[in-house]
Each structure stands twice: as structure tokens, then as C-alpha cells.
Image (cartoon, rainbow, N blue to C red):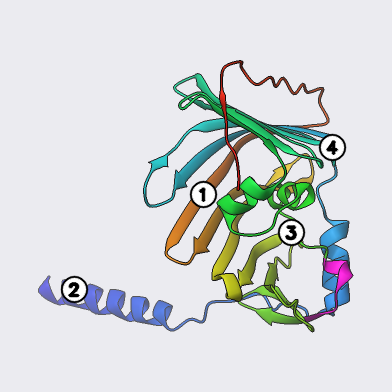
Amino acid sequence: MNKVVYLLCISLLFLNSCKGTKEVATTRIKKLSAEKVIANHYNKSFNFETLNAKIKIKYDDGKKSFGPSATLRMEKDKMIWVSVKMLGITLAKALITPEKVSYYEKIENTYFEGDFKLLSEWLGTELDFEKVQQLLLGQALFNLRDDKYKATVYNQTYQLKPKTELALFERLFLIQPEGFKIAEQQLKQPIENRNLNIIYREYQKVGNQDFPKRIRIDAVQTDSKTTIDLEYREVDYNARVSFPFKIPSGYKEVVIQ
């Protein structure tokens, strides 16, 4: 009986060792030109007129952290509306248009109306309406068709680097080979010691299109770091949406110098 047990043990060890020597199959990515990768990226962009989504947010800037839920609504190229809640209570609302950013929050009873400077300060890079919209949709922040890029295969993605870099920015884009959505995009401003890293950890199917599921944003400025995790819980598109927004009376205006 002991010999039988012994032989079984040896057999199991042998089988396990054989399994360990098998190579993990990886899919080879077809080499494509930068122009082809970029064309596919825009051909696969999320096609919609309106959007209505539920989002879970985790925010941490090293001094404070919180995890509210939010409702996000969009009208393509025209409006982005966000309502932030915690325990069912509305804490803040924001309305972003190509012309301005408006928000108010009920904890300190403050509000802001103005350009994108405040939002740019939060994320450490110059933002406008289009960049915010593209960030939320899994698209490149910069228009990739405006410059010449070099494409290489890196870590199972297409890596795009500009052939000629902007004076104030260093840009890097990693694009998925399956749906040609952004896997990661990095923006650096060496002179101002600012880094913005946006990682799209997961995509989901909305209709028959690829849409972000989880996004991580790391914004580093000199000696501070802000991390924002976004998780889309529900996404609906092309339905009728409204954008109710009115700054309450008596709130104190936030002034950006």
C-alpha cells in the first residue's frame, strides 16, 4: 500500500513539473504603421449623441480621501453634467461646456464659474472641453492626427510617440490592439514638474461598442499626488437627458488668481 501511495506522489510531482515547463501562449500583435493605428483609434471611437451613466469615484490627494457616487450625463461636443452624491445626498454639481466650467458644492457652500484653469489645476495639465470629453470616453486627449507619430509594439499594445515633441509636453499613448481604444496615456510637463497618467484598466460593451469600465488617473505635481479612480456602473446612450443646474443663492465664489 505504501508503494502505491509513493508512486502516486511521484506521478503527481512529475505531472506538475511537466505543466510548469509549458510555455504560455501569447498572441502576436501585427505591426501597423502609426497612421493605421491612429485611423483605427478614431474609427472605433464611441458613437453617441447623449450619454447617461452611474459612476463610483475614489478620490485621494494625500490630505483627504472620499468615495462618492456620481451621475454623469453628456450631450456630445456640447455639455458634460455631473451630480455627486454620498449616502443619497447631493454634495455637488458641475456643468462643463466648451465655453466654461461651473460647479457648486454644499459642504463649504462655494461655487465657481469661469474657464478651465481650475480643472487644469486639479489634474496638473491644460484642459479644455474636448480633452475632458475624450478622457471620459477612452480616447486620446490630444488629436493624434495633428502630428507625426512613431508606432512600436510594447507590452501587448501599440505605443505611439511623437516624432517631434512639443516644447512643453512629453506625450506617450498606448493603444489596445483589439478595439484600438486607449490603454494608457501619459503627459509630462518637465519644466513645471507635472505628470498626468491615465490608465484604462478595463473596457465593457455598451451596445456593440467598447466603452471604459474602470479608469485610474494619477496627477503628480512636484511634491503632491492626486489619484482618482472611476468605475462606470451603468451606461446608457442616446436616451433623452436633462442637465438641471442652478447655483444656490448665498454661496461664496471661488476666485482663481
Read off the magenta span.
144-150
Q: As drawn, which residue projects farthest toward the top?
A: 249
Q: Which residue is mark 1?
A: 228
Amino acid at dot 2? Val
Q: Quadrant of residue 9?
A: bottom left
Badge 2 vs badge 4, beta-carbon distance below 8 Å: no
How dense is the environment of label 4, judged by Cα within 10 Å: few (below 14), some, or many (20 and up)? Answer: some
Decide whether residue 148 is among the magenta residues.
yes
Q: Residue at x 69, y 73 (%)?
A: 168
Q: Position of residue 77 (x, y in %)?
A: 85, 42
Q: Which residue is mark 3?
A: 141
Residue 51's place in the image compared with 163, above or below, is: above
Q: CA distance from mark 1 to mark 2?
A: 58 Å
Q: Which residue is mark 4?
A: 78
Q: CA distance from mark 2 to mark 4?
A: 75 Å
Q: Earlier in the sequence, mark 2 or mark 4?
A: 2
Q: Secondary structure at mark 1?
A: strand
Q: Position of residue 18 (x, y in %)?
A: 40, 81
Amino acid at dot 3? Leu
Q: Earlier in the sequence, mark 3 or mark 1?
A: 3
Query: Where residue 4 is drawn, which disc sits there?
Result: 2
**Residue 83 can be seen in this image:** no
